[in-house]
């Protein structure tokens, strides 16, 4: 057993913002998801993020931003996380088990919300890596299907195994008793890899620019009259996708000024 496998998760039971871990799933050596109890007072809009974490070695909370991956009707909260080997938080967080406590500040915020988009016919969810987390929430929210006739989830990772969390989520959605019927026929899932052979490959930016995704799905190209988009990935990804969306005539919106697309960072500090 390696040393990190026996890391002890600090207990935070005495803190008012402690929540209990109810489920942990490891997807790859770099990715895991977990569910925790939901504070009764917590209301959020699907797509928002909160600060979560553990007690640091110095006795102070060590918190990071995390998109809530569960929909707002869920009794629990779900998160989808990277494991950064030397990351101050995730080097520890990756060892949580059912029954452990995490800290969760119940103050949701964020730009990937329906309120920040003008009404439209199609909505595009564009994500790389853990950037799918806010869309895991939005894809499970009935409001998404009330507001749009078509929902297109493009998710790109380097390898097939990194797509698995999203793949299972979409598959389970169809069988969901609450919104399975709403989703059928409306949700189009377009996963791609960039570094492993797969039936659909390529970066989201390239597949939008060269029209491959429109051709593969048999749909019309993006049009600012009908299309809306939400973007979540690395800074470099966000910047490049924004340029592509602007090329189609879409403009960036915000909570205070809804327009055709909105963007959120999936993480900070990737050197851009
Ligand atoms: P940090 O010191 O925070 O990060 C170390 C380095 O790891 C970073 O410089 C970066 O290069 C890399 N890194 C950090 N996060 C990621 C990531 N998600 N994917 C790839 N590389 C990364 N992280 C999640 O895993 N799931 C989420 O839902 C999520 N939502 C976020 C929402 C917002 C608005 C922001 C700003 C960040 C979000 N993050 C998310 C990133 C998260 O806040 C932490 O950075 C991450 O948990 C790593 O924490 P750390 O202390 O271990 O390392
Ligand atoms: P690629 O393999 O061509 O770099 P990462 O694991 O580095 O965070 O990347 C996740 C996915 O996002 C990868 O498939 C990667 O493709 C893709 N990607 C990274 N940067 C960009 C970008 N600037 N524009 C579009 N896709 C990107």
Image (spheres, rainbow, N blue to C red):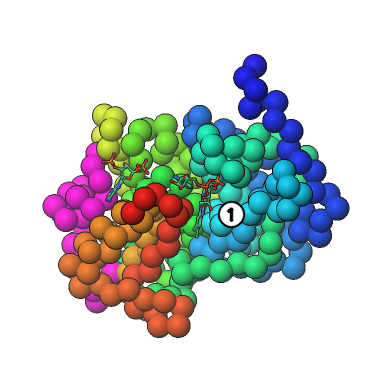
The answer to whether any part of residue 36 appears in the image is no
Segment colored magenta: 200-227
Of residues 136 and 252, the one drawn nearer to the viewer in this rendering: 252
> Which structural element holds mark 1?
strand
Q: Quadrant of residue 208?
A: bottom left
Residue at the (59%, 54%) spot, across then down: 64
Other-residue count near label 1 (Cα within 10 Å), few / some / many at <14 / 14–19 / ≥20: some
Residue 204 covered by magenta stretch? yes
From the image, tell me which residue sits under label 1. 64
Q: Residue furthest top?
A: 1
Residue 218 placed where, x, y %? 20, 53
Residue at the (22%, 69%) spot, across then down: 246
Q: Residue furthest bottom?
A: 257
Residue 140 placed where, x, y %? 52, 57
Residue at the (73%, 47%) spot, across then down: 58
Of residues 106 and 25, the one drawn nearer to the viewer in this rendering: 106
Of residues 212 and 253, the one drawn nearer to the viewer in this rendering: 253
Residue 228 placed where, x, y %? 32, 69
Of residues 218 and 252, the one drawn nearer to the viewer in this rendering: 252
Q: Is residue 152 left or right of residue 221?
A: right
Q: Quadrant of residue 95?
A: top right
Q: Residue furthest front?
A: 58
Dividing the image into 4 quarters, which one contains the C terminus?
bottom left
Residue 207 placed where, x, y %? 21, 50
- Tell whether circle 1 marks a residue whose Cβ is less than 8 angstroms from ligand 1: yes
The answer to whether any part of residue 92 appears in the image is yes
Residue at the (53%, 34%) spot, across then down: 85
Q: Is residue 159 left or right of residue 2?
A: left
Q: Is residue 147 shown above or below 258?
A: above
Residue 151 covered by magenta stretch? no
Q: Is residue 235 left or right of residue 42?
A: left
């Amino acid at each position: 057993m390696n040393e990190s496998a026996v890391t002890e998760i600090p207990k935070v039971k005495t803190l008012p913002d402690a929540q209990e871990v109810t489920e942990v799933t490891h997807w790859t050596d770099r990715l895991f998801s977990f569910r925790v109890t939901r504070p009764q007072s917590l209301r959020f809009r699907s797509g928002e993020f909160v600060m979560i974490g553990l007690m640091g070695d110095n006795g102070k909370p060590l918190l990071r931003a995390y998109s809530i991956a569960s929909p707002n009707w869920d009794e629990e909260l779900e998160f989808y996380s990277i494991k950064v080997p030397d990351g101050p938080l995730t080097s520890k967080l990756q060892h949580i088990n059912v029954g452990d406590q995490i800290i969760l500040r119940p103050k949701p915020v964020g730009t990937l919300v329906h309120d920040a988009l003008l009404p439209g016919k199609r909505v595009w969810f564009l994500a790389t890596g853990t950037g799918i987390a806010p869309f895991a929430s939005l894809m499970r929210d009935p409001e998404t299907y009330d507001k749009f006739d078509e929902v297109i989830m493009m998710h790109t990772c380097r390898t097939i195994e990194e797509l698995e969390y999203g793949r299972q989520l979409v598959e389970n959605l169809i069988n969901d008793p609450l919104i399975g019927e709403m989703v059928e026929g409306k949700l189009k899932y377009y996963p791609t890899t960039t570094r492993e052979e797969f039936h659909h490959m390529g970066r989201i930016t390239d597949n939008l620019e060269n029209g491959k995704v429109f051709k593969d799905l048999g749909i019309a190209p993006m049009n600012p009259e009908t299309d809306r988009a939400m973007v979540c990935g690395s800074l470099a990804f966000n910047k490049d996708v924004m340029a592509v969306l602007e090329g189609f005539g879409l403009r960036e919106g915000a909570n205070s000024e809804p327009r055709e697309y909105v963007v959120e960072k999936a993480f900070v500090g990737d050197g851009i």
